Amino acid sequence: MSAPPLPAVSRVTRALPIPAGAGLARMVVLRNVTSFRHGWIALISGFFEPVLYLFSLGVGVGALVPSVTTDRGSVVTYAAFVAPALLAASAMNGAVFDSTFNVFFKLRYAKLYDGMLATPLGPRDVAVGEIAWSLGRGGIYSGLFLLVAVLAGLVHSWWSLLGLPAAVFIAFAFAAVGMFATTFMTSWVHFEYVTLAIQPMFLFSATFFPLSTYPGLLQWLVRLTPLYHGVALERGLLLGEVGAGLLWHVGYLLALGLVGVLGAARRIEGLLLR
Amino acid sequence: MRSLPFGTVVRVTANGSATPAERPTRRRPAPTSGPILLARGLRKTFGEFTAVDGIDVEVQAGESFGFLGPNGAGKSSTMRMVGAVSPVSGGELRIFGLDPASDGPAIRARLGVCPQTDNLDDELTVEENLWIYGRYFGLSRAQVRERAAELLEFAQLTDRAGDKVEPLSGGMKRRLTIARSLINNPELLLLDEPTTGLDPQARHVLWDRLFRLKRSGVTLVITTHYMDEAEQLCDRLVVMDHGRIVAEGSPRDLIARYSTREVLELRFDADDQAAPAAALAGVGERLEVLPDRLLLYAHDGDAALSAASARGIRPLSALVRRSTLEDVFLHLTGRTLVD
Ligand SMILES: Nc1ncnc2c1ncn2[C@@H]1O[C@H](COP(=O)(O)OP(=O)(O)OP(=O)(O)O)[C@@H](O)[C@H]1O
Ligand SMILES: [Mg+2]
């Protein structure tokens, strides 16, 4: 049965500046799952990178640095210090890769969304569906990474159980912003900007050394980056340094994600429904 | 309104009306009274540019309707508005009596769309393309599997079901696109240049498929710049040029109204057409001078050819043929359709 949107829902979405959708975003996810059944190898590669970092840095650098004092004052091994950061980064990488490269290809070359929008699906379904898939991908990488971290004996707090939902949340924020940004790209050259944004963030979001090691002004700059909030959130959970302050990071990522979803849906609407 | 899912066997009863031999697999909303497609003063602008400039169109259920026009006439722009994926810039548009601005999803749920350029999902197999597209309409897994099997048969692609889409031939891709557009049992099928770029044989196969659909009661709206296609498939058509409708009627009406029964085509050495053109004055009803030939419109082409010979005209080649929509278009716009 073709399911028309519920009258109440469509009345609300019509009143708000939210692009139209038919509540069928899950079918976009289903499309991606079907497609990846043919190329699941591509899913595997994204998993190894953070694991390799964990062992090269955690074990290698960890041998030189006996312990680290976190910004919240705990003293931990270097491996335990970087593991949460790499967890956040793996969520970011999985989500950003999918929501930029893959979305760009579908939008500009395969014209997949044009096909979707000829059905009851609306731009909101496309945006929500793609972002859900990307965050799922980020979530899978993070889940596997967390498992490796647990097996490596780097995780001790029960709060770490929340590390996975938190990673999915981080993936959500990055997938949404990634897709939004992608709608502005018109050529593959523009992906240099993605790399330009991701790499420094990966290195300097208090990932590999505590925020306190940065000079004062730079600390504020770091605090503005989204990955910093992801790292701080995961570190708080995995090291059991939990406090109300973590909600601030949650709020930042949530706001970023919502702006991304709305922006992406609006842009898809503007680009394809003219 | 009679719209049956493809695959329903239709028997023609004694009085000539078709009745379904099976019940449709899916219940339809109550038949829309009034035209399936209604446009009044419909306009589409892109910035300063006007692509569709106030057209009036009415298509009834079960009809097969064509938009004929050269490149840039505004056919695709019109089709996209009808497909509820392009906002109307002015005028009124109703599909199934609904307004695309407010009921886009409800309209699209009842439409099948075959866009000008294929946008099949290259990362999926042939059958997955049908399944997934059906799911976009909210159909269940079981429904899309059943329907896809029928449609693969219809598109003669059953033996390619598990193959990737990429290596299919152009004709196969087009047939798959049309099959895909039928996954939701549409009441109205929009075909934007369904056979452009196909070889003659592939075109005939497609025409045959479209003809069957038409017989099963699906309303077709087709754009084309092929005359023979319009003549084959359309009950009624409009000729579009520069975003406007310049003529409307059945192919036969249009030919009768805007052309003669026969046409005499004369070819000369490229440079000296002026002399024979002048010498032909008074022969036939009308003369069109094209860059590469003269077209002499006459009721009796052979008689016109004799008259030309009597005047000492010696063409490189001479051909008498029946008038087509191409001639109608030439007469209406002074230009050929496919150049
Ligand atoms: N998105 C757009 N932005 C700006 N101009 C457009 C857009 N889409 C179409 N046009 C212009 O509108 C005019 C009509 O285009 P349209 O695609 O409707 O023509 P058509 O009759 O389908 O032609 P063809 O036979 O080449 O497919 C063209 O001049 C085209 O350049
Ligand atoms: Mg066109």
Image: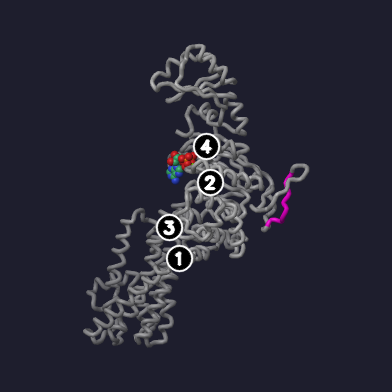
Q: Earlier in the sequence, mark 1 or mark 3?
A: 1
**Contact between labelled residues 1 and 2, with CB atoms less than 8 Å apart:** no
Report x, y in % for residue A50: 33, 75
Q: Do labels 1 and 4 share a chain?
A: no
| Amino acid on which the number 2 mark rests in the picture | Met
**Contact between labelled residues 4 and 1, with CB atoms less than 8 Å apart:** no
**Residue visible at 63% across and 45% down?**
B214
Whether ligand 2 has any atom under 8 Å from the Cβ at mark 1 is answered as: no
Give the Cα separation between the discs numbered 1 and 3: 17 Å
Whether ligand 1 has any atom under 8 Å from the Cβ at mark 4 is answered as: no
Q: What stretch is highlighted in magenta?
A: B17-24
Give me the disc on residue A135. Answer: none
| Residue for badge 1 | A38
> What kind of element bears circle 3?
helix
**Contact between labelled residues 4 and 3, with CB atoms less than 8 Å apart:** no
**Camera-side mark, 1 or 3:** 1
Q: Is residue B313 magenta?
A: no
* Chain identifier of the residue bearing label 1 in the image: A
Give the Cα separation between the discs numbered 2 and 4: 22 Å
Give me the disc on residue B81. Answer: 2
* Chain identifier of the residue bearing label 3 in the image: A
Q: Are marks 3 and 4 on the same chain?
A: no
